[in-house]
Image (cartoon, rainbow, N blue to C red):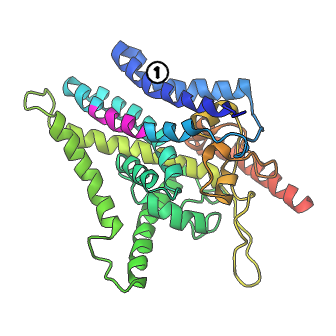
């Protein structure tokens, strides 16, 4: 009998509803979405706890799961045209708040889905991944994550692996800028191996720089009117702000997932193979519903193409004290983060020595 245990992932569609409801009720209700994500979900994680049950791929080939992922793509694109409409008569405060709320969707859910689809062999999935990344001006992630991070994770060569004692803000600068430059390096080297000059129109990084700009111009061209009460430059400002919020959420997740973990090097100077010990995990039920089990991150690095709904809870992996929403809040306050995580990291390392 086909299992539908993973239908909890449908709860993700609550988030855009909260965005719309909060806006149209107005007032303090416009904070409904961030309060839900960063207050209610952590509380529910605490109350409901973890679920270590693993879903077998043989047990539940649920076709609704892929439709859910692909269905998010047109919804996210619609959100931009909706936002452009409501910005027409908005104050500067409302513009910034709308950018923050939209960034929670595009970064928290959109990039998570783009992350999964970008690992698939199916051409439609890969196109959808790049469309979602386009809306947060982070298309280079498609190259850097697959060909960079998954190769060098938990080593000093990986910009997206946080070092022990490194605060999030220092990590953000390194991961954002070095990650972007590394994506250029990877793409250029790929063309050089083929004997082709990297400065050609098939170089993906060139188009990855152009597409977000074209998308922003398209949204503005289809929605802006000279009669609007705000200047035209508000639209690109909104797009840039929500992009920064979106990819900052991604970098917060990167920071949480690999903080302080380093792969061992053998006598030949080679790093050990990536295994389930090289990512922090959490199986808190509620936040995992909203993130499609991304928080079971070690299994993702073991088998990158595995659908997230099947990612396994692995007892041996280092475990976070809460789900990503609560951990993100901790990461934003370095003293709190270090007080929680440094001792936990050292205790986990001691278990490896004693094992």
Residue under label 1: 32
Region in magenta? 72-81
Question: Is 266 above or below relative to 344?
Answer: below
Question: Is 111 above or below relative to 4?
Answer: below
Q: Where's residue 66, x and y in %?
A: 53, 42
Query: In which quadrant of the rendered image does the N terminus lie?
Result: top right
Location of residue 309 (image quadrant): top right
Query: In which quadrant of the rendered image does the C terminus lie?
Result: bottom right
Location of residue 236 (image quadrant): top left
SS at mark 1 in the image: helix
Q: Where's residue 89, x and y in %?
A: 20, 23
Q: Name the one closer to the observer, 133 or 318.
A: 133
**Residue drawn at (30%, 27%), measured in percent from left and top?**
93
Q: Name the one closer to the observer, 157 or 287.
A: 287
Left or right, 276 with reference to 181: right
**Residue drawn at (45%, 63%), measured in percent from left and top?**
143
Q: Name the one closer to the observer, 331 or 283.
A: 283
**Residue drawn at (26%, 58%), measured in percent from left and top?**
210
Location of residue 196 (image quadrant): bottom left
Q: Name the one closer to the observer, 326 or 315.
A: 315
**Residue drawn at (15%, 40%), measured in percent from left and top?**
221
Outermost left residue:
226
Residue 83 is covered by the magenta coloring: no
Left or right, 238 with reference to 337: left
The local crowd at label 1, few if under 14, some if 14 to 19, many if 20 or more residues have their Cα within 10 Å, is some
């Amino acid at each position: 009998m086909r299992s539908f245990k993973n239908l909890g992932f449908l709860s993700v569609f609550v988030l855009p509803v909260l965005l719309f409801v909060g806006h149209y009720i107005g007032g303090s209700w416009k904070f409904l979405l961030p309060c839900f994500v960063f207050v209610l979900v952590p509380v529910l994680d605490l109350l409901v706890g973890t679920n270590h049950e693993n879903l077998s791929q043989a047990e539940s080939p649920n076709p609704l799961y892929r439709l859910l992922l692909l269905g998010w793509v047109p919804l996210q694109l619609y959100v931009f045209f909706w936002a452009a409409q409501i910005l027409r008569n908005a104050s500067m405060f409302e513009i910034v708040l709308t950018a923050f709320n939209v960034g929670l969707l595009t970064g928290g859910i959109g990039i998570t889905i783009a992350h999964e689809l970008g690992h698939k062999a199916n051409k439609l999935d890969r196109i959808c991944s790049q469309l979602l990344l386009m809306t947060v001006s982070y298309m280079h992630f498609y190259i850097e994550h697959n060909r960079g991070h998954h190769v060098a994770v938990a080593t000093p060569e990986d910009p997206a692996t946080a070092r022990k004692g490194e605060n999030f803000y220092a990590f953000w600068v390194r991961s954002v800028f070095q990650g972007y430059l590394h994506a250029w390096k990877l793409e250029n080297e790929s063309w050089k191996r083929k004997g082709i000059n990297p400065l050609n129109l098939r170089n993906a990084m060139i188009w990855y720089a152009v597409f977000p700009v074209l998308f922003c111009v398209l949204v503005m061209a289809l929605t802006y009117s000279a009669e609007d009460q705000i200047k035209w430059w508000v639209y690109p400002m909104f797009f840039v702000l929500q992009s920064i919020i979106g990819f900052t959420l991604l970098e917060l997740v990167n920071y949480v997932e690999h903080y302080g973990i380093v792969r061992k090097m053998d006598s030949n100077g080679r790093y050990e193979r990536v295994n389930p010990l090289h990512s922090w995990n959490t199986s808190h039920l509620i936040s995992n519903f909203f993130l499609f089990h991304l928080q079971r991150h070690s299994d993702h690095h073991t088998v990158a193409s595995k659908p997230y709904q099947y990612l396994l809870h692995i007892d041996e992996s280092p475990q976070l004290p809460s789900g990503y929403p609560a951990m993100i809040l901790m990461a934003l306050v370095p003293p709190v983060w270090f007080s929680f995580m440094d001792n936990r990291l050292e205790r986990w390392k001691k278990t490896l020595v004693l094992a």
